[in-house]
Each structure stands twice: as structure tokens, then as C-alpha cells.
Image: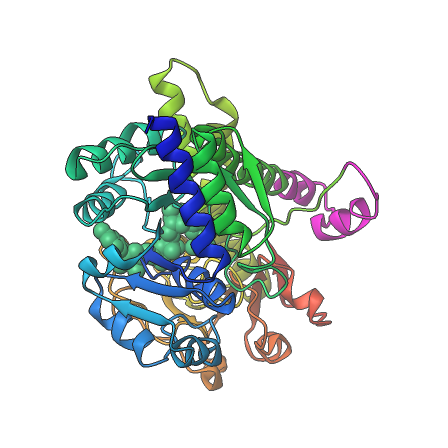
Amino acid sequence: MSQAARAEAMADAFVRRLEARDLTVGIVGLGYVGVPLAEGFLAKGLRVVGYEPDAAKVAALAAGESYISHIDPVRVKLMAASGLFQPTTDPSSLAYADAILLCVPTPLDAHREPDLSFVEAATRTVAEHLRPGQLVALESTTYPGTSAEIVRPILEDVSGLASGVDFALAYSPEREDPGNIDFGATSTPKIVGADTAPERRMASALYGALTQVVEVADLKTAEAAKLTENIFRLVNIALVNELKVVFESLDIDIWQVIDAARTKPFGYMPFYPGPGLGGHCIGIDPFYLTWKARAHGEPTRFIELAGDVVTAMPARVVEATARALSDISGKAVNGARVLVVGLAYKKNVDDLRESPAIHVIRLLRERGAEVAYHDPFIPAAPDLAEHPEIAGMTSAAWAALSDYDAAVICTDHDGVDYAALAAAVPVVVDTRNALARAGVAAANARKA
Ligand SMILES: NC(=O)c1ccc[n+]([C@@H]2O[C@H](COP(=O)([O-])OP(=O)(O)OC[C@H]3O[C@@H](n4cnc5c(N)ncnc54)[C@H](O)[C@@H]3O)[C@@H](O)[C@H]2O)c1
């Protein structure tokens, strides 16, 4: 049989198994992305094997417990009760899977360059158990070229199998938006790219069982599409933060400006300012492209400028806090007791990776403030090597609000009593317009 015929036969067999719902999906990395993805496939009646090296996460998921606070425990109970879900620390279980989806971290290293060590390690693990007929798809956000230049060679070299003939390789970027109750794994279209038609057919069939599929010509176009989405967000978030600063100097409320501008039914999309930029995606992914562009001798001035603008925001918030303390209470930051409200990088999640609140805490301390935080989603700050400034901190009791000289709202979680905050703390600095949105008008509050 020719290689082309073998590839078509592989795709036919895969699609037949899928149509018969006799197919197992392997998910590598059961984190913020992997868990909802597993849930999506389980909901469509497919078996899911989840390989995750963190035994505590596996034990929790196997027991039907959610270890991610914005994922309702009932959802994880249902996953466990389905009888179709097998979370495991044993990578050899991946051999039973027909499709293996890689959902591992893609952070930046100490030099702010792509750290593909998780992708490489996970790919090697998959390669050690790879068998003919399997589909491997990378979902991690990364620069164009990763699947073809890093993932494919590892899979082929370790397994001795040929991509596009013995096994299929695809890239399908994850668009999970943690905490978003309107869009999830089964309601968000999935971009699918592969370098040959049979591989694309397999990947589209698999993801088509989950949600609407948008096919693109190849791996690198799919990789570029994901980065484009996140770079678009970064640049617009930076722009609106710059506008905030300019309008503040003109005594114009940026929030009212955005509310007015967004009434235009075309050609405008609202983005909102805040204390900076956080999370595992928008502050990191764009720099994957910067790195790749540099290797091709192309500048990425927009991306770098946007990065500079948002990185400066926490210092501005601290400066605004110092001004507000002085204007309202006649106090200095040095020696003031300050409560940072919200440690997570965005509302209603427990994810504090790259959170600007952490920078606000560090900068306030550098100016001599005594800082505590309150976050109903993060009872205790985890011990993270990259965030030593919050090690050992626990969420301060809400009842003790009168202990503080100032509060800085960094994250606008729902369920926080903003009226009580403004009533009890002499100075409130609001980076999210949380008070106004809660209908609280307070003379002791400043926007920043
Ligand atoms: N979190 C999001 O909102 C989001 C949204 C879209 C895309 N993404 C992208 O998805 C990818 C995963 O992000 P995440 O937020 O789920 O990360 P995460 O840290 O929550 O989860 C990743 C999981 O992979 C596991 N892991 C690490 N090394 C492994 C290995 N060698 N083999 C198997 N598992 C391994 C980790 O233990 C962890 O549980 C990243 O590329 C990220 O940029 C994330």
C-alpha cells in the first residue's frame, strides 16, 4: 500500500471508531485546560484517559473532587460518576487512547523566552507509548513552528513511526476562558490545523464531536491564529490602560468613556483597564511570537510596547494609593496598613499566576506599607518559587476591615461586599470600577 493510501486508511479507521463512539481520548496534563476538555469529551460519550504526573490532582479528580475553585465540584463528581473517566499518573495508559491531546504549560523562562520543557517532556512521554493509528494534537499555546519543529521530530525519533502515515499530528489551540459561564469546551469553536488532508480529517472529526470546527491549512497557521487572538487582547488592554492614564490627567472617567464608546454597534470592542496584566496567557503568549520573530530578524514593536505599558501599571496603582492616602487621610504609605482586595489575576477564579496584585503587594511593601490581602477564592497563597513575595500569606478576615488605613481593589470578584469595604476603610483605591458597578458612591474612594 502506498503511503498516501495508508494515511487514508488510518483516517478512515479513526473516523469509524469515532462514529461508533468506540474511541478513547487521552489528555496529557489535567490542569485548567485539561480538566474542562476532559469534561467536554465525557459529555459527548467518549472515554477519557487523563495522564497527569501530580498525584494529588489525580487523586482528587478520581474521587470526584474539584481542585480548581471555579470548576463546580458537581461537574467533577459527574465526570467521575460517568464511569468513562480514568485520571492516572501512569503514562502507559496513553497506549489505550486513540487520540492524545497535550495540555501542558508553556511559560516563559527567566530570560522571558519560551520554555518548551513541558511540551518536550510530555511529547517524549507520548512518543514512548505511541502506536500506529493514533492522533496526537498539541493544545498548548506556542509559537508557529513548534508542532513541526519540536513535537513531530520527538514523536518520530522516539517511536520510529512516521507522522502523516503511521500516526497523525495536529494542532488545535485551547480557547478555555476560566470562569466564563457563557462559553466552554463544547460551545467555543475549535481551530484545527494539520499538514496533510488525512491528518486534518482525523483531527476535525475528533474535535467536531466536541464542538464546531474551523479548519486551517496547516499546523503553523493554527499556532499563529491562537497567538493572534492573544496579541490582539494584549495590545488593546495596553491601549485602554494608556487611555486611562491620559483621561485621568484630564479628569475624565475612562469607565464612562468606554460605556459610551461601546454603544457603537460596529467597529469598536470594549476592553477595560485594571491594575496591570496577569494570567498564564495574555502576558506570556505574545512573547512567544516576539522570540520567533527575532529569530527571523523581524521586530515586534507593538507587542513589546504593549508589554511595557501594562508592566508599568502596578507602580501607577501604588502611586495613586500613596496620593489617596495623603489627600484623604493625611497619611504616608510608609507605615500604613493596606488591604489588597483580590489576589487572583481576574474575577471569580483562583488563578494567581502573573497576577498584577502580587506586584502591587511587593511595591507597597517596598514603600514601607504593611500589606494583607483578602480573596475569597484564595484562602492561602500557595508557595510558588516565582512569587516569593506572597509566600505564607493567608486571606485576611473580612470582619477586620477597620484595621486598615487603605484598601486597593485589584480584582473585582463577585460576592465581595464593596459597600461594607468603602464604609469601613478610610481610603479605597479602585482599579476595576467595582464600587460604581456595585452602586457604591463613596467620597473616600479613588479610581486608579
Ligand atoms: N489556563 C487558561 O486559561 C488557558 C487558556 C487557553 C490556553 N491555555 C494554554 O494551555 C496550556 C495549559 O495551560 P493550563 O492553564 O491548563 O496549565 P496548568 O498548569 O493548569 O495545567 C497543566 C498541567 O500539566 C501537567 N504537566 C506538567 N508537565 C507534564 C508532563 N510532562 N506530562 C503530563 N502533564 C504534565 C501539570 O502538572 C498541570 O497539571 C498552556 O499552553 C496555556 O498557555 C491556557
When the figure is inspected, residue 71 is found, relative to residue 140, above or below; the finding is below
When the figure is inspected, residue 202 is found, relative to residue 370, above or below; the finding is above
Residue ranking furthest to the bottom: 399
Q: Residue at x 32, y 63 (%)?
A: 49
Taking the image as drawn, is residue 263 in sight? yes
* Percent of width and height locating residue 299: 44, 18
Q: Quadrant of residue 269?
A: top right
Q: Residue at x 37, y 58 (%)?
A: 25
Q: Main secondary structure of the magenta part?
A: helix
* Percent of width and height locating residue 372: 38, 70
Which of these two is toward me, 177 or 359? 177
User: Is residue 260 a member of the stretch shown in magenta?
Assistant: yes
Residue ranking furthest to the top: 297
User: Is residue 336 a member of the stretch shown in magenta?
Assistant: no
* Percent of width and height locating residue 335: 37, 65
When the figure is inspected, residue 292 is found, relative to residue 34, above or below; the finding is above
Which of these two is toward me, 77 or 291? 77
Taking the image as drawn, is residue 365 in sight? no
The N terminus, quarter of image: top left
Q: Residue at x 50, y 55 (%)?
A: 176
- Say whether residue 119 is left or right of residue 260: left
Q: How many marks?
A: 0
Q: Quadrant of residue 153?
A: top left
- Say whether residue 82 is left or right of residue 256: left
Which colour scheme appears in the figure?
Answer: rainbow
Q: Residue at x 33, y 53 (%)?
A: 366
Q: Which residues are magenta?
A: 243-267
* Percent of width and height locating residue 437: 70, 66
